[in-house]
Amino acid sequence: MAKKDISYPEQVLEPVKKHLADTLTELERRKKNIVKEDPFMDPTRLEDNAAVDADAAEQTGHMRVSAIKEALDRSIIQIRKALSQIKIGRYGVCEKCGEMIDTDRLMIVPEATVCMKCQK
């Protein structure tokens, strides 16, 4: 697992960095808003003596919000990781094998930190 000393030029990375930062901001905004949709966050819920079907709807709503929040958290972590890779000059280099990640993959998934071969 020998790492090669390769990196993209700054003028190539600047738009990628801006795109990732903008995406991170949007994901954090969405996460903040999705938490507000969680039925478990409603303070009047504790005073409610609703029917069993209402309780089931709350459970389903909570599970949906939790799943979306978990997916957003994973995306946020990946984007932060990619931004730190840019900062240290390792963006576009597979963190497992040390080879360059295919540029087509980076165009589709700019937050990718592993190549397709290692992803499999």
Image (spheres, rainbow, N blue to C red):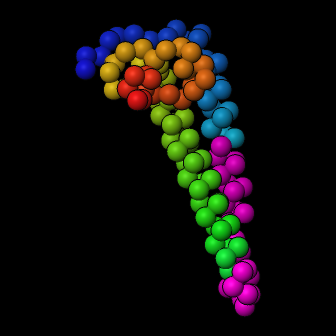
Q: Is residue 48 visible?
A: no
* Residue at the image point whose x is 64% and y is 60% from the top: 64
Query: Which of the pair 120/32 is nearer the observer?
Result: 120
* 34 on left or right of 93: right
Q: Residue at x 63, y 72 (%)?
A: 59
Residue 96 included in the magenta stretch of the image: no
> What stretch of residues is rendered in magenta?
27-54
x, y (%) of residue 55? 68, 80
Vertical relation: 37 (above or below) 101: below
Q: Quadrant of the C terminus?
A: top left
* Rendered residue at 55%/53% (across/down): 70
Q: Quadrant of residue 61?
A: bottom right
* Dominant secondary-structure state across the stretch colored magenta: helix
Q: In the rendered image, which quarter is residue 1 located in?
A: top left
**Which x, y percent locates residue 51?**
73, 87
Q: Residue furthest left?
A: 1
Q: Nearer the viewer, residue 83 or 41?
A: 41
Task: Where is residue 84? Give x, y as percent.
Answer: 47, 30
Magenta-drawn stretch contains 51: yes
Q: Is residue 20 visible?
A: yes
Along the viewing direction, whichever of 19 and 99 lies nearer the viewer: 99
- Where does residue 108 sit, x and y in percent of width and height? 61, 23
